[in-house]
Amino acid sequence: MSSTDLFPGAPEHHVTPSVPEPTPEEAGALEDLYANFGRANLIPLWTEIADLMPMVPTPKAVPHVWAWNSLYPLAERAGELVPVGRGGERRAIALANPGLGGTPYATPTLWAAIQYLGGRETAPEHRHSQNAFRFVVEGEGVWTVVNGDPVAMRRGDFLLTPGWNFHGHHNDTDQPMAWIDGLDIPLVHYLDTGFFEYGTERVTDEATPDVSRSERLWAYPGLRPLSGLGRTVNSPIAAYRWEYTDAALRQQLLLEDEGQPATVSQGHAAVRFSNPTTGGDVMPTIRAQFHRLRAGTSTSPLREVGSSVWQVFEGRGEVVLDGVTTAVEKGDLFVVPSWCRWSLNAESEFDLFHFSDAPLVERLHFDRSFAEGDGR
């Protein structure tokens, strides 16, 4: 789709104003002017406007798919060769978007990685300005300890580590475990706002409770402790458990069967993880959602300002990114850059975890979307 499709009458590109050819004297004067600009570390707008102010977003990040059956063996091999401990801190392998010049970023604002922890291993505690989460596509046996609160990690769980919270991980089994990490590392890097601090060499609490303290206090639907009525920047819930996510999606589709308006579109159930103290997103820079499509369901093509990363949790289907269709299955990850045209097709029942920079885009009032068929 071109800019003229979105904005009738708009030119495809910026048009250079028609001006007479300069005389030799004028050409020499202009050459001298531009040389002086360079010496003074100045760049004139009129030579850059097409790149600085495009008709529609033109991200350097490109749509890309990473296959889980390629990622996991590489993480497993790293587990054999690369130790966990001070210095490297984490055995985390970042998704590097091919359009971003070799930086370890999935998008200009989002970092995503597969993290691998071997049996009986401990990743030492530290904290940083960057907001982080973990999502588990398979396995169990690891506890992440956030500010001294041990939080069990199990399949389908979405776990938070907000910025400047001490955290470490310990594996209480003989079996390795892998999950994905999501952070706002690129955003913090570009804003020059990052801080980092080492914590203990292991973790401050090696207990292995089924339910964390934060869940015991906060994770009851519709109920809020009177001891915590203030608004918090980040959600106080350390773990959003799969059984509740699954139940919410299942009930949306059952309500749809009963003729109730419960789903995003026919056959497409979705939920957003939220901060119970504000009703907003779990963290100020990251939105997290979960989608379930019935077998045979397709979503309408959509373009949105802002970027996102998806992981297939279960099932098989296709993702269409700027006209390129790719089959995806359990564990596969893909990136949707800003204003990329994307849609989903479900072969089987199709579950997908999704995170994005939407809170940041919306707070700056840059949000815009275009859904084919309804003119949004």
Image: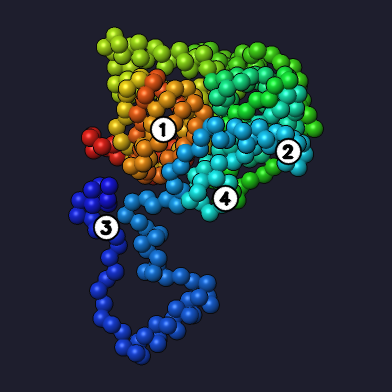
User: What label does residue 342 carry, if any?
Assistant: none
Mark-to-mark CA distance, 2 and 3: 50 Å
**Could you tell me which secondary element the residue under label 2 belongs to?**
loop
**Could you tell me which secondary element the residue under label 4 belongs to?**
loop
- Farthest-out residue, right: 201
2 or 3: mark nearer the eye: 2
Of marks 2 and 3, which one's residue comes earlier in the chain? 3
The residue at which mark 2 appears reads as 82
User: What label does residue 12 carry, if any?
Assistant: 3
Amino acid tagged 2: Val
How packed mark 4 is, by other alpha carbons closer than 10 Å (few <14, some 14-19, many 20 or more), is some
Of marks 4 and 1, which one's residue comes earlier in the chain? 4
Of marks 4 and 2, which one's residue comes earlier in the chain? 2
Query: Dots 4 and 2: beta carbons under 8 Å?
Result: no
1 or 3: mark nearer the eye: 1
Image quadrant where one finds the C terminus: top left
**Could you tell me which secondary element the residue under label 3 belongs to?**
loop
Amino acid tagged 1: Ala
Amino acid tagged 4: Thr
Query: Dots 3 and 4: beta carbons under 8 Å?
Result: no
Mark-to-mark CA distance, 1 and 3: 32 Å
Query: In the displayed structure, does residue 117 sit left or right of residue 297?
Result: right
The residue at which mark 1 appears reads as 327
Mark-to-mark CA distance, 2 and 1: 32 Å
Residue at screen point 40% across, 19% down: 349
User: What label does residue 103 carry, if any?
Assistant: 4
Query: Dots 2 and 1: beta carbons under 8 Å?
Result: no
Query: In the displayed structure, does residue 270 sit left or right of residue 128?
Result: left
Mark-to-mark CA distance, 4 and 2: 21 Å
Of marks 2 and 1, which one's residue comes earlier in the chain? 2
Mark-to-mark CA distance, 3 and 4: 30 Å
